[in-house]
Amino acid sequence: MTNLKQAILQGIPSELPTKRNINTSVSHAPNRKNILNKEEKQLAIRNALRYFPEHMHTVLAPEFAEELKTYGRIYMYRFMPDYEIKARHLEDFPHKSKQAASLQMMLSNNLDEAIAQHPEELITYGGNGSVFQNWAQYLLCMQYLAEMNDEQTLVLYSGHPMGLFPSHKDAPRVVVTNGMMIPNYSKPDDWEKFNALGVTQYGQMTAGSFMYIGPQGIVHGTTITLLNAARKIDARAEDLSGKIFITAGLGGMSGAQPKAGVIAKGICIVAEINPQATYKRHEQGWVDEVYKDLDELLDRAITARTNKEAVSIAYDGNIVDLWERVVERNIHIEIGSDQTSLHNPWAGGYYPVGMSYDAANEMMANNPEEFKKEVQKTLVRHTNAINTLSDRGMYFFDYGNAFLLEASRANADILKPNGDFKYPSYVQDIMGPMCFDYGFGPFRWVCGSNDAKDLAITDRIACEVLEKLMQDSPDEIKLQMSDNINWIKAAGENKLVVGSQARILYADAEGRMKIAEAFNNAIADGTLSAPVVLGRDHHDVSGTDSPYRETSNIYDGSQFTADMAIQNVIGDSFRGATWVSIHNGGGVGWGEVINGGFGMLLDGTADSDRKLKSMLFWDVNNGISRRSWARNKEANFAIKRAMKMNPDLKVTMPNTADDSLINSLDL
Ligand SMILES: NC(=O)c1ccc[n+]([C@@H]2O[C@H](COP(=O)([O-])OP(=O)(O)OC[C@H]3O[C@@H](n4cnc5c(N)ncnc54)[C@H](O)[C@@H]3O)[C@@H](O)[C@H]2O)c1
């Protein structure tokens, strides 16, 4: 048996391992606020000690107290394993169940140092998107996965492995809940408190559900958004070519914008105030050119538009200076957006104009009140420039970063007379009606062999399936099909893989089922060397209820309900998912969204074939039926098509009330 297998099977060691210092070469989570009173701190330490035999307590109790004092959390650094945590071939993980091995592969990828934002605090992305709360939970979970069989289910409560429960072979191997709270206890400080007590965690979307696949997901989503934004403003446009898109931010997610802009064949200008972020993205090849001089930059962009060049250009400076120079020079810009971190405006998410990055950071630490005023003044100027350019014909959309909300709080001129925002969000205008309502969403897969050769074969298979389907596709979805065919053809050469051998593309229910079926056949006949894991981002058709993002284009009042996400995960669990997950929080914040997802191992068997057909059909059509009931016409079209495909599907269809009748009522 390999050392890795032995270490995993050992679980929590019976003898105390030597104390470890944190690794200073990796990024660490910020220290969390000291929110617990003395009794609560004692409770947090008692809670942490539950994982360990009594003979360790005299050493561990003061150590955990120190962690709680220093970091605001108890991570149990001493128990970090010595081996490298990363995705490997399924057979490299100890297992009695292949399905359980696939979970070990996926969760290891989420904690890989090359992938995770703060690996030693078990955080994959988004600042607080946890896989587990502490290292004891990781060790115990891996041990359970190594020992379990196909008639057991592992139950995870916010990272805590409650244990293995007898079930049956068609049941999920793992059921994950993250951050589920009694609704009255879902404010941001509730997360701080109950996470510090060690009884809940923020799983984001794909962090605590083991489905994160590195930056590829965000590049694809941004590419699809930009292609469809271009078509929205120009019915003859196939892509972004000959159009200028201006935005801000070259950080974690926003750094995908220039790469996606070039894949969409456009001219993408991105302002970034932090020179380190700008030059890092330039070195990585994610942005082509960097300018400090605004006029040189704008001249370059105009030449690129004339020549229909696809190029990404960074402005090393503040976005407001860029927008105001564009206004002064009266340059026509086709599309505008923003991806500064305005969900976090007072603590470094958004930098005021007229001062350097370092000066702003100093003001933020030493004079937070003044900093707040400068941020709000900047937001007013930012909005004025966008308003002027929009009056001249630019299409502007909010990219899910709370730009509209914070601009309105700063009293910028961002509201219509009726109190609505002047601009739409990307889901209201683009993703919702053009993708989600038709069932198109972020389907993904990961090769269990961890071999790039297998990934290339899956790319080819997926492309063949989509090309075949496109021959009979209705006009309404042809463009989505061809975008994803183009994406998958170029995916290999775009070198998007970091960590596990994974791929994403947008597909509807039929596309997802047909691709999955073809993979299952290829595993059965040996074309693929190992099983494949299927999954998706929670940011999808059916998985997420979030009134200002995924369900912002639901207008029947139900955008504030969460029945869809809960129904989805329950439905997936009895139709064949290998694991299911449901989370409070993710993207827009704790208490603001409920989101869920699944993972499914395809192993080339008839059982897999049955499960994939049953579960994927439900996983997409649940959300389409809800979108159709909300009277979204694209979803109406898609659900009627689904009912024709499967006569066992019978969905309640809405009747439409006449506007003049409603308006004539004496209310
Ligand atoms: N890409 C998507 O699909 C998507 C989807 C939903 C939400 N978002 C939102 O986008 C935002 C950005 O996410 P991220 O992970 O890239 O965050 P991040 O903090 O890593 O990056 C934001 C960048 O903006 C820069 N910045 C801030 N103020 C600036 C200014 N005035 N001028 C120029 N640059 C400035 C910062 O220096 C930083 O590098 C978040 O609010 C996120 O929730 C993105």
Image: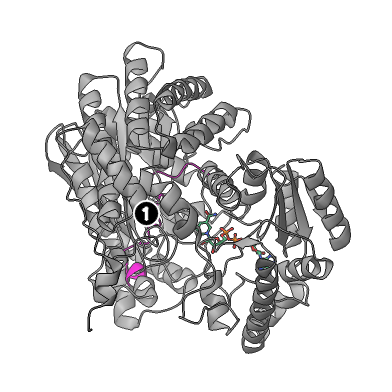
Name the dominant secondary structure of the magenta segment.
Answer: loop
**Where does the image place residue 254, in percent across and percent down from the top left?**
60, 55
In magenta stretch: residue 558: no
- Residue 88 percent coordinates (x, y): 45, 30
The image quadrant of residue 276 is: bottom right
Q: Which quadrant holds residue 558?
A: bottom left
Packing grade of label 1 (10 A; few <14, some 14-19, many >=20) is many
Residue 287 on image: x %, y %:
72, 47
What is the three-letter code of the residue carrying label 1? Phe
Front in this rendered view, residue 569 or 550 = 550
In the image, residue 522 above or below residue 560: above
Taking the image as drawn, is residue 337 in sight?
Answer: no
Please name the residue shown 36% across and 43% down the image: 439
Give the camera-side residue of 437 and 56: 437
Q: Residue furthest top?
A: 525
Secondary structure of the residue carrying tag 1 is: loop
Which stretch appears magenta?
194-214
Q: Is residue 58 left or right of residue 274?
A: left
Q: For residue 211: magenta? A: yes
Q: Residue at x 54, y 64 (%)?
A: 398
- The quarter holding residue 77 reads bottom left
Total labels: the figure holds 1
Residue at 40% over, 42% down: 440
Q: Residue at x 32, y 44 (%)?
A: 637
Indicate the position of residue 155 as horizontal and vertical percent values: 21, 48
Ligand 1 quadrant?
A: bottom right
Instruction: Kindly identify which residue carries mark 1.
Output: 132
Answer with left or right where residue 247 lies relative to residue 505.
right
Q: Is residue 97 visible?
A: yes
